[in-house]
């Protein structure tokens, strides 16, 4: 699917699209080599970076509810909670460095979404987490650029 098809998707769909792509990329890149809990943390940081740009005007609690909702579409709630509360263990410089890079990639892609003029249709406009389930992300096969998730 080409980037031209992105014009017809809402911002919510586009975020779901990139999140699913990042999830597949993490799975392909790290598989069993990196514990699932660390992959969840990486995914959460990527999503945080992506949504921090497009939800810049939201209160932190609203932004967190959006992140929690998007992650909940891909991983079970208990893993979402752990991913959002976890911090790297002391001395885990690989995870610390990778989190920074993954979050920066998310931010870069968030800016690209806004620059492309994606319609800003976010399913969290009611400012209540319960409203978050109204827009399902579209499953699209596309991988992040190779530099997206370095080993």
Image: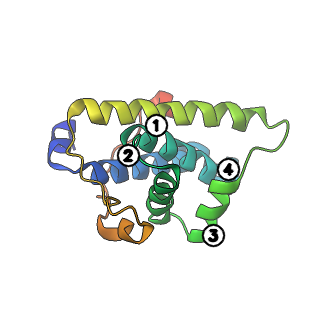
Percent of width and height locating residue 44: 55, 50
Tell me which residue sits at (37%, 36%) in the image: 110
Separation of residues labelled 2 and 3 (CA atoms): 22 Å
CB-based contact (under 8 Å), mark 2 and mark 1: yes
Assign a secondary structure to mark 2: helix
Disc 2: which residue: 18
Placement of 74 over or under 54, stated as above or below: below
Separation of residues labelled 3 and 4 (CA atoms): 14 Å
First in residue order: circle 2 vs circle 4: 2
Mark closer to the observer (3, 4): 3
Say whether residue 125 is visible.
Answer: yes
Separation of residues labelled 1 and 4 (CA atoms): 17 Å
Residue 38, labelled with which disc? 4
Number of residues whose C-alpha sits closer than 10 Å to that of mark 2, classed few (under 14), some (14–19) or many (20 or more): many
Number of residues whose C-alpha sits closer than 10 Å to that of mark 1, classed few (under 14), some (14–19) or many (20 or more): many
Q: Is residue 76 left or right of residue 87?
A: left
Disc 1: which residue: 106
Disc 3: which residue: 78
Mark closer to the observer (2, 3): 3
Mark closer to the observer (1, 4): 1
Locate the N terminus and report the quarter of the image it occupies. top left
Say whether residue 149 is visible.
Answer: no
Assign a secondary structure to mark 3: helix
């Amino acid at each position: 699917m080409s980037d031209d098809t992105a014009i017809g998707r809402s911002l919510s769909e586009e975020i779901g699209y990139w999140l699913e792509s990042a999830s597949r990329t993490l799975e392909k890149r790290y598989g069993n080599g990196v514990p699932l809990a660390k992959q969840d943390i990486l995914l959460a940081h990527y999503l945080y970076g992506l949504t921090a740009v497009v939800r810049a005007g939201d209160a932190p609690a609203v932004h967190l509810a959006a992140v929690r909702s998007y992650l909940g579409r891909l991983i079970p709630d208990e893993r979402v909670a752990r991913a959002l509360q976890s911090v790297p263990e002391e001395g885990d410089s690989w995870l610390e460095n990778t989190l920074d890079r993954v979050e920066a990639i998310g931010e870069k892609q968030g800016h690209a979404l806004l620059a492309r003029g994606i319609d800003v249709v976010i399913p969290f406009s009611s400012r209540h987490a319960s409203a978050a389930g109204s827009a399902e992300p579209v499953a699209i096969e596309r991988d992040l650029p190779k530099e997206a998730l370095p080993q």
